[in-house]
Image (cartoon, helix red, strand yellow):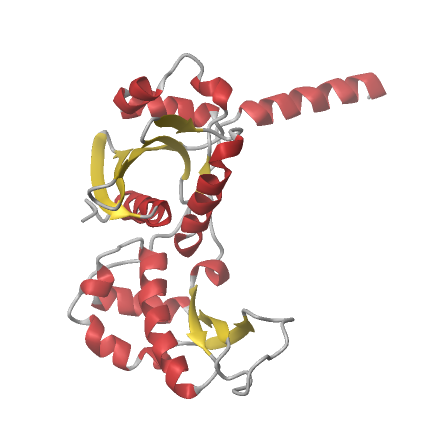
Amino acid sequence: MSGFLRLTLLTVALMVAGLAPCTAFAATPDELYQSQTIVTGQGEVNRQIGFKDCLDRVLVRVSGDQRLPKKPEMADLRDKAGSFVDSFRYHDRLEGIPVHDEQGTHDRPHDLTCLYKPAVIDKVLGELGSKPWLGGRPRLAVFLTAEQGTRHFALTADDPPGQAMRESFVNATGPLMMHIEFPPASLLSGMDEKTERAADMASLDRLAQKAGADQALAGSIVWSDKELGWIADWRVAMAGKTYRWQVRGVSFDEAFRVAIRGAAQILSGNGQPK
């Protein structure tokens, strides 16, 4: 095969790959069956508190079901949360910063990461009437409009003032192993914030695929002096149905966490977010 033909075929292959639909993200068991929380020091008392929080988190992470921590059965499960942990590790959040008080290191904040065996967590989920959400998790394109006083804008991938919101949204995805994209401004040309808010989910899903995602997560946040925070409305479609949910009077960090939790609730097959 000539060098020219080889180069031509490679170029075509790259073009086809760039146009191919994005495949859903599939986590490995090691990535999925773990959770993390923040504890003070490495003492046994705070470790047990951390184990309880990590149990809540891993059950939601694996299943996508946000309702599990509120189930009455969780009280007994939390009492023996440590028995479900296969291994754990600490990371000092102040690593590299010298101790500067008389108490030493036992009061320093640590990330506590707990790892679990899939069979153990799957059994607990079964006892709670739930199941693991395995396979690929769809990559979502975020179509967000924001309003704060006289400032109105649509969040895009290349808007410098939106950097803090984009970083916050990405941070919200980690606990649930979700992945998001932001549409480039060019994709939204000719579409103002009002048009974007009114767009149906089928149209936004088509735009999402052009942005390299599987489907759309649409929302709006409006600052409210009365609520002392943002009012956020979210939409996502599944099996031809559009689901809607809302949160009021929160920071935009929490608004984005609510968005991701709600999307996971729906796309994992666990129904309407509360």
Question: Going 36% across and 81% down the picture, which residue do you hit?
Answer: 48
Which residue is outermost to the top? 190
Query: Farthest left residue?
Result: 72
Numbered disc total = 0
Q: Position of residue 113 (x, y in %)?
A: 47, 70
Depicted 115 relative to depicted 210: above or below: below
Work out whether 235 lies above or below 62.
Answer: above
269 left or right, relative to 7? left
**Viewer-proximal residue, 219 or 3?**
219
Vertical placement of 40 versus 141: above or below?
below
Image quadrant in which the N terminus is located? top right
What is the x, y in percent for residue 73? Answer: 18, 71
Q: Closest to the observer: 76 or 155?
A: 155
On the image, the x and y values in percent for residue 54 come to 37, 69
Tell me what residue is drawn at x 34 percent, y 21 percent: 193
Q: Position of residue 262 (x, y in %)?
A: 28, 46
Q: Is residue 192 visible?
A: yes
In this view of the protein, can residue 24 be seen by the observer?
no
**Residue 227's quadrant in the figure?**
top left
Residue 189: quadrant of the picture:
top left
Q: Residue at x 59, y 79 (%)?
A: 100
